[in-house]
Image (tube, grey):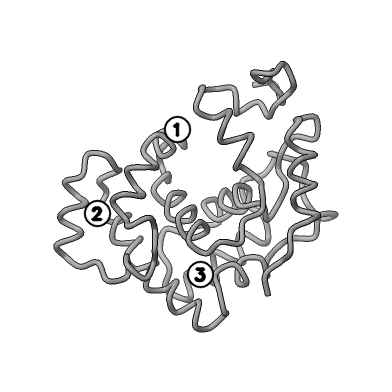
Amino acid sequence: MSKTVEGPDGKPRCGWSGTVDEFFPYHDTEWGFPVDDDRRLFEKLCLEGFQSGLSWRTILTKRENFRAAFEGFDFDKVARFGKRDIERLLKDAGIVRHRGKIEAVINNAQRAQEMVKQEGSLAAYFWGFEPDAEGQAAAQTVSTTAESIAISKDLKKRGWKFVGPTTVYAFMQAMGLVNDHIPDCVIHAQVESARSKFKRPT
């Protein structure tokens, strides 16, 4: 795949965004733009966990179904899910029906509540791992980094599940902790601008 592909407006985009139609709007308006909303951060980490072994297209096309199934990824609500909810979700054809991943979301919601008490917010925790831009690898050339490995290790120590280093790095790329757009991609500069104006949570 070429590093860039022509977008709907004739301008270059990251090559992966042209593989299916659904990717262009996601690439142009979400991927890489910095996020400090705890619910969105929790949602993305959960969806990346569901993606493990699958394609992002599968998850993206089911995203609204996931949101409906998991109370909009409000982790205070999801933390209260019990056996009856797990059985309900295993019958929900609109999502990925994988018991381990469903149970991981519920577990992680409980761990998220603990993290808010300990760290103030999920945002403050994750942005505390933002890497130095000068030390980053070239865009889209790695699937893990020292930071994603460190986050994964720490999350697992805190009891989180389905948070391997590759999953965590995909989360970091999407939530703007790194700008992994190809430099020639027209969105790269937009993300860079958004990141420069973004107030890091503490």
Q: Relative to 173, is 136 on the left or the right?
A: right
Q: Residue at x 31, y 49 (%)?
A: 68
The answer to whether residue 83 is above or below residue 141 is below
Q: Relative to 185, is 79 on the left or the right?
A: left
- Disc 1 versus disc 2: distance between alpha carbons? 21 Å
The answer to whether residue 188 is above or below residue 119 is above
- The residue identified by callout 1 is 57
- Residue 159 in the image, given as x and y percentages of width and height: 42, 73
- Residue 35 in the image, given as x and y percentages of width and height: 62, 56
- Disc 1 versus disc 3: distance between alpha carbons? 26 Å
The answer to whether residue 78 is above or below residue 89 is below
Q: Amino acid at mark 3?
A: Leu
- The residue identified by callout 3 is 155
Please tell me how crowded label 2 is: few (under 14), some (14-19), or many (20+) other residues with Cα within 10 Å: few
N-terminal of the two: label 1 or label 3?
1
- The residue identified by callout 2 is 99
Q: Residue at x 38, y 55 (%)?
A: 72
Label 3: element kind: helix
Label 2: element kind: helix
Q: Quadrant of the C terminus?
A: bottom right
The answer to whether residue 13 is above or below residue 197 is above
Q: Are marks 2 and 3 in contact (CB under 8 Å)?
A: no
- Specify the quadrant of the image occupied by residue 92: top left
Q: Residue at x 49, y 77 (%)?
A: 115
Q: Amino acid at mark 1?
A: Arg
